[in-house]
Image: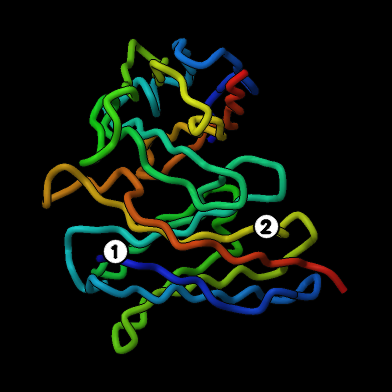
Amino acid sequence: QVQLQESGPGLVKPSQTLSLTCAVSGESINRDTYYWTWVRQPAGKGLEWIGRIYTSESTSYNPSLKSRVTISLDRSKNQFSLKMTSVTAADTAVYYCARASGLDTGGPFVYFDHWGQGTLVTVSS
Amino acid sequence: QSALTQPASVSESPGQSITVSCTGTSSDVGAFDYVSWYQQLPGKAPKLIIYDVNKRPSGLSNRFSGSKSGTTASLTISGLQAEDEADYYCTSYTTSNTWVFGGGTKLTVL
């Protein structure tokens, strides 16, 4: 059974870099049949897609966050990571990692079938 | 990319049916049959309930169904139960190879 688990600091100072990891179990991130993604949700607000990475290390990011976001793979630990620079209070949110799958193993991988439980990141001095 | 448009809230009595709309553009909802819907209970992660417009994950109740016409997708929940009370989000894959979410709809079962 696929499981995803986010981890990282719960408090980040303004202007610093937010760093989170998502540990994946029950599936290899090297499989070419999924995207690995990040989604966030400010308290009381809706979901916002942040970005995704493929096993080839190709990435795609939300245009509104692209200049500040990097997603990478760590194959040795079967996990992927999110880095967001120059954070402000507006980046305070619950951050989820999720797996994107598709009806066909060749893609596209367009729906999020497995999610982590989420981790709250607060940006404050 | 702009968020998809969903009603902020909907309410109905147990046993009745509701439909939640999700309106996008020709670059997202209207471009592909790649709309999915998620149920989010308070304090929990979202859960996939509909994918590719109208497909249900294995084991999910057939009280949940999806459809699409043009740039508007819809989620219908029939035979409402108290346990259906949650937030519901639509999302669509886009022509830019990104995703866009709806603002979410809070369902209240009266």
* Image location (x, y in percent) of residue A89: 80, 59
Q: In the structure shown, which secondary structural element does the residue marked by tag 2 occupy? A: strand
Q: Nearer the viewer, residue A39 or B42?
A: B42
Query: Label 2 is found on which chain of the structure?
Result: A
Q: Name the residue located 51 percent from the left edge and 70 percent from the top edge.
A: A82
Quadrant for residue B37, please give it: top left
**Does B20 sit left or right of B96 as displayed?**
right
Q: Is residue B41 above or below residue B6?
A: below
Q: Tell me the residue that label 2 is attached to.
A: A93
**Does A82 sit left or right of A119 as displayed?**
left
Quadrant for residue A116, please give it: bottom left
Q: Name the residue located 43 percent from the left edge and 42 percent from the top edge.
A: B99
Q: Quadrant of the C terminus of chain B?
A: top right
Q: If you read the primary sequence from the N terminus, does the residue marked by circle 2 or circle 1 appear first?
A: 1
Which tag is nearer the camera, tag 2 or tag 1? 2
Q: Nearer the viewer, residue B106 or A77?
A: B106
Q: Is residue A125 visible?
A: yes
Dot 2: few (<14), some (14–19), or many (≥20) neighbours within 10 Å?
many
Q: For the residues marked 2 and 1, what is the alpha-carbon distance in whole angstroms?
A: 24 Å
Q: Tell me the residue that label 1 is attached to.
A: A54
* Image location (x, y in percent) of residue A15: 78, 72
